[in-house]
Amino acid sequence: MVTVNIDLNILDNDIALDSFAVPSQLTSTDVIAQDIKHRIIESGKLTELIGLRNKNIVSKILTEIELIVEQDQRLESGTIKVVKTITGEISVTAKTIEGAV
């Protein structure tokens, strides 16, 4: 059975509207990505990274973020990668399970 994911598009903590003032929607992997983004933000782990220079503590927090992402059952276990880029951005990559998109 194929699961279809549909959700409202949230930008800057508000519902995104199209040119006709109709709420825009997300589907497929975009829904999963938005859910994961919100889960990470709500965890409070990102604010713990602010100003940190100790690589061991940063690595620990990135691992905690990875474990948060790993809880999503629409992702293949073991494919989640969370890295902090040179510019300071957090990048999350993962493979979705067939039928979950």
Image: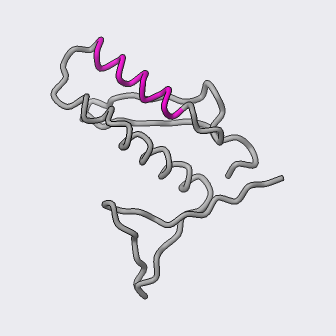
Question: Within the magenta stretch, is there residue 63?
Answer: yes
Q: Which residues are magenta?
A: 56-69
Question: Within the magenta stretch, is there residue 54?
Answer: no
Left or right, 41 with reference to 86? right
Q: Main secondary structure of the magenta part?
A: helix
Q: Quadrant of residue 63?
A: top left
Return the residue found at the far bottom: 20
Of residue 74 and residue 96, the one placed in the foreground of this image is: 74
Q: Residue at x 66, y 33 (%)?
A: 76
Q: Is residue 63 above or below residue 88?
A: above
Left or right, 97 with reference to 89? right
Return the residue found at the far top: 56
Q: How many marks?
A: 0
Q: Position of residue 48 (x, y in %)?
A: 25, 29
Q: Is residue 98 above or below residue 18?
A: above
Q: Position of residue 6 (x, y in %)?
A: 61, 63
Q: Position of residue 71 (x, y in %)?
A: 57, 33
